[in-house]
Amino acid sequence: MDFAHESFINVKNEIKPLLDEHWKEIALHKDSIRLNPDWKGYARLSDVGGLRIYTAREEGKLVGYFVVLVSRSLHYMDHLFANNDIIFIKKGHRKGTAGIKLIKYAVESLKDEGITLININSKDHQSFGPVLERMGFEQIESVYSLKVN
């Protein structure tokens, strides 16, 4: 398995089928909240240096991604934070350590950029929190959601 930091332009079309597979697996409220990525928004973030895409490839084929949004913290302006947007490894590639290696690769890359804090979201209904904790991450808060429309 190969891991890399890739540009949005290079992975945009290749990532689409994986996003759909990911959405089908984890999304709640599928009947009323459809997957519809803001590709122009991602492109704008990429253009201003606020988007990082780390990929996992098996024999050149994309099998996973870890996407983070990088920005100066509004509360701690002396620090850059990397906030996870989305992380996914195709089911057939989850046995073993592919996901851990992808995260470790991204962490090292982000650390080299001077990032202070990396936040990763884990859905409660498909949590990988224990894996993150073994990697040194700590749970810092919970998010509650209310669908109103």
Image: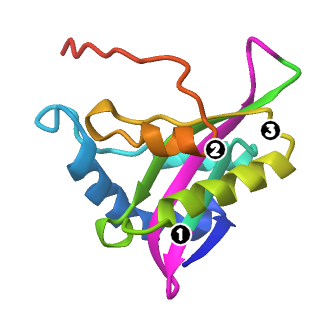
Quarter of the image with the C terminus is top left
Dot 3, how many residues are within 10 Å of its Cα: few (below 14), some (14-19), or many (20+)? some
Mark 2: which secondary structure?
A: helix
Q: Which mark is residue 56?
A: 1
> Which of the two discs, 3 and 2, labels the residue nearer the N terminus?
2
> Which of the two discs, 1 and 2, labels the residue nearer the N terminus?
2
- Would you say residue 19 is visible in this rendering? yes
Quarter of the image with the N terminus is bottom right
Q: Which mark is residue 1?
A: none
Task: Tell which residue pokes out farthest to the front in this image.
Answer: 134
Foreground: disc 1 or disc 2? 1
Cα distance between the residues tagged 1 and 2: 24 Å
Q: Amino acid at mark 1?
A: Ala
Foreground: disc 3 or disc 2? 3
Residue that numbered label 3 is attached to: 115
Q: Does residue 115 sit above or below 75 in this rendering?
A: below
Cα distance between the residues tagged 3 and 2: 20 Å
Q: Amino acid at mark 2?
A: Arg
Tell me the quarter of the picture where residue 55 sits: bottom right
- Magenta segment, which residues? 56-76
Residue 12: percent from left, percent from top: 50, 63
Q: Indicate whether residue 73 is drawn in magenta.
A: yes
Residue 54: percent from left, percent from top: 61, 60
- Would you say residue 41 is visible in this rendering? no
Is 37 displayed left or right of 67 in the figure? left
Q: Does residue 109 sit above or below 30 in this rendering?
A: below
Q: Which mark is residue 44?
A: 2
**Residue that appears at 43% across and 17% down:** 142
Q: Amino acid at mark 3?
A: Ile
